[in-house]
Amino acid sequence: MTDTEPASPPTSERDPLTPPLPLEGAAFALWQGFIGDAADNDLEPDSRELALLYRACSALTHVERLQREVAALPSLVTTGSAGQVVSHPLLATLAAAEATALASLRALAVSPDASAAASAKASKRWHGPAVVNLR
């Protein structure tokens, strides 16, 4: 597998709560936090949630790799085909990867800033909506 090929998603042949690929940084924190929160609440993520978690972790890993590549660039601009100054193509790639990561986090109902609203949303997802007795 090359650096640009995504790892295969989780399969039933291994422990589904173990990350399917080596994770670092934000992706590792997300996986550990999500699985840890589930365990703390005596819950087990279903296959849909694990697939979304895998997608979010893959996207975050890709974003972090692109951020390192952009940071190593000598300049954020380059020369276009007609000799004009244009943004480096990696900037657009990074923006697209960040949008994918954000969409994945939203699908998981996880806020990138781990705000109180995200915690409430995650709690609602795990515990269901509050039941109100109208009698």
Image: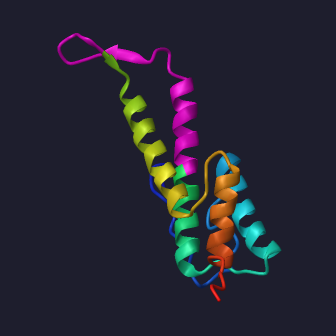
Which residue is at a point 79% across and 75% down the rendered structure image? Answer: 39
Q: Is residue 69 left or right of residue 135?
A: left
Residue 16 appears anywhere in the view: no
Percent x, y for residue 113? Answer: 65, 45
Quadrant assignment, res 16:
bottom right
Instruction: Indicate whether residue 99 is drawn in magenta.
Output: no
Give above or below for 55 relative to 97: below
The relative height of residue 56 versus residue 15 in the rendered view (above or below) is above
Residue 25, given in percent of the width and then of the height, sits at 70, 46
| Quadrant the C terminus occupies | bottom right
Instruction: Name which residue lies at 48% across and 43% down.
Output: 98
Please report the residue visible at 39 percent of the width from the left and 16 percent of the height from the top: 77
- Quarter residue 78 falls in: top left
Callout count: 0
| 62 falls in the magenta region | yes
Residue at 56% x, 25% y is 71
In the rendered image, the vertical position of residue 115 relative to residue 17, given as above or below: above
Write the start and end of the magenta stretch as one range: 60-85
Whether residue 79 can be seen here: yes
Q: Residue furthest front?
A: 135
Residue nearest the viewer, comparing 87 with 37: 37
Dividing the picture into quadrants, the one containing residue 131 is bottom right
When the figure is inspected, residue 89 is found, relative to residue 15, above or below; the finding is above
Residue furthest right in the image: 40
Residue 99 place in picture, x, y as percent: 44, 45
The picture places residue 86, in percent across and down from the top left corner, at 31, 17
Colouring mode (rainbow / by chain / secondary structure / one colour): rainbow
